[in-house]
Image (cartoon, coloured by chain):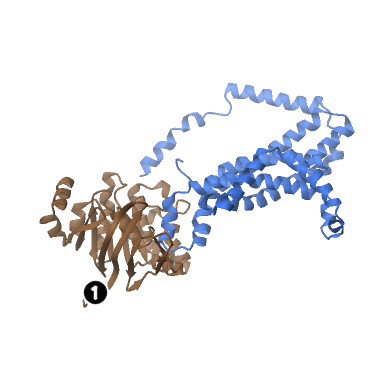
Chain colours: A brown, B blue
Amino acid sequence: MGGPEQAIQVTDLHKRFGSLEVLKGISLTARQGDVIAIIGGSGSGKSTFLRCINLLELPTAGTVSVHGETIEMKSDGHGGLIPANRRQVQRIRSRLAMVFQSFNLWQHMTVLQNVIEAPVHVLGVPKDQAIATAEALLKRVGLFEKRDVYPAFLSGGQQQRAAIARALAVQPLAMLFDEPTSALDPELVGEVLSVIGDLAREKRTMLLVTHEMKFAREVSNHVVFLHNGLIEEQGPPDEIFGAPKSERLKKFISSIH
Amino acid sequence: MSDSLTAPTAVPAGPRGRSLFEPHRLFLMAIFAGLVFCIVWFMRWDWLPQYGTKLVYGVIETLIMLFATAIVGFLLAVPIGLVQVTGPKPLSWLALTFCTIIRGTPLLLQLWMLYYGLGSLFAQYPEIRQSFLWPYLRQAWPYGFTALMISFAAYEGEVMRGAFKGVPRGELEAAAAYGMSPFKLFWRIWLPRAIHRALPTLNGETVLQLKATPLIATITIVDVYGVISRVRQDTYLTYEPLLLLALIYLCLTGLLIYGFRLLENRIPTRGA
């Protein structure tokens, strides 16, 4: 193979909700340092795809590997899959940090407590060490002064930055961003994108589901366009946005601008 | 930032900042003071010293019953509420049936069913009479405790069901996404979050539980209400002991509410 090691490899992923097939066989490889933007219209299955990687949604068929380790699945007896080894799933999830559209900070904890929760209680990092790391991360996302504030008292942009600090605190092998700016007021989108942009420039492995096309073009090194549960087109950002081949992608891009 | 913080606090300063000594307030205070004076001066309170110790013990008995039943009842309410949200189905139905039956019948009836029904049933079996439990089963308090505890568990089971259900799905997903085991997710996120949501309701329910405790006086347990009944029988006084009883319950309620407020304020909430 050569080149950087594989971070995430998804092979022939299918997902069905009842009679509706949302994902119809998607394969994707992210090597370390890849920033992959996943774009597509609503209902194209891009969020479902992302959520299948850390098994927040259970795929109906297909495999997911993280750092060469394949997540073991077994049949649930009704034509779907369930994890064969729950411990393995928990271990892999603990190093795949996810940033959600609606932040999903734990509201009964302060910002700092949110950030140290997974390191201390999942990864077993000593508390004082976790706090030191967390404070450094909060400084980095510009929230050090807010560390003892409860999430309900923060703006959307601040909450999402806190959620990004929470994601970084587990020293993730890869980061999954699920439309991180879609729930934000327009004037707050910039502060979050600038944080994510910095992370991308650091060559952190990330999969980014987004509607921010300009941003996707700027920070990603690979763009995947999903349509109706299939990869319609993929390639380097300049090709995807500059010279789209498929009709659907052309239409999609023109409808965005 | 500091501007936006000071602005809203300045608004309520108007009405709240008003002096305590405005004419209409002074007038109300005078009426109240007069009332207290009349109660102390014109009513009979000479029995008080004689029953002082008994009253204290009565209050302690009431508080022990309240806290013991509320704590154990709440511990039961957590699984009762949880299985109704998570399943499995049979357990969920069982919990629902339990809540429906207990909440659908008067507490006094349950208490008497236990004490007079079960209590006399137990007495018919020599095995039970000879067992080490008999010395306890002969007394009234196990029945009082059980009835109050079950009642609290049923009502709070319903409260906790709502509270568990109300915790945003996304927060639980985040916990799962960061690799928490189901047990850890429950213990670290779901339960504390649900309790926090339920605290204002639990506050009210605990006050109701306090005011349900005098029912145990009907099965010979001497709580504060029992002591006051005794006073009324001995002295043939009606209003004085009852007024005192009202005052005692009022104070206990005030303390409960204050205690819960402290708990609630540990985690500030905004909006909902």
Lateral position of residue A187 relative to residue B64, left or right: left
Please identify the quarter of the rendering in which residue B9 is found: top left
Callout 1 amino acid: Pro
- Residue A47 image point, x, y percent: 31, 54
Q: Chain ID for label 1?
A: A
Q: Is residue B18 above or below residue A46?
A: above
Outermost residue, left side: A243
Quarter of the image containing the N terminus of chain A? bottom left
* Residue at figure coordinates x 23%, y 59% from the top left: A37
Residue placed most toward the observer, A211 or A198: A211
Residue placed most toward the observer, B223 or A249: A249
How busy is the neighbourhood of tag 1: few (under 14 within 10 Å), some, or many (20 plus)? few
Outermost residue, bottom side: A2
User: Can I make out residue B266 in this image?
Assistant: no
- Residue A38 image point, x, y percent: 24, 57
* Residue at figure coordinates x 63%, y 52% from the top left: B76
Q: Is residue B55 above or below residue A173?
A: above
* Circle count: 1
Residue labelled with disc 1: A4
Please identify the quarter of the rendering in which residue B129 is found: bottom right
Residue placed most toward the observer, B110 or B194: B110
- Residue A217 image point, x, y percent: 18, 57
User: Can I make out residue A251 in this image?
Assistant: yes
Lateral position of residue B30 relative to residue A6, left or right: right
Lateral position of residue A91 relative to residue A238, left or right: right
Q: Secondary structure at mark 1?
A: loop
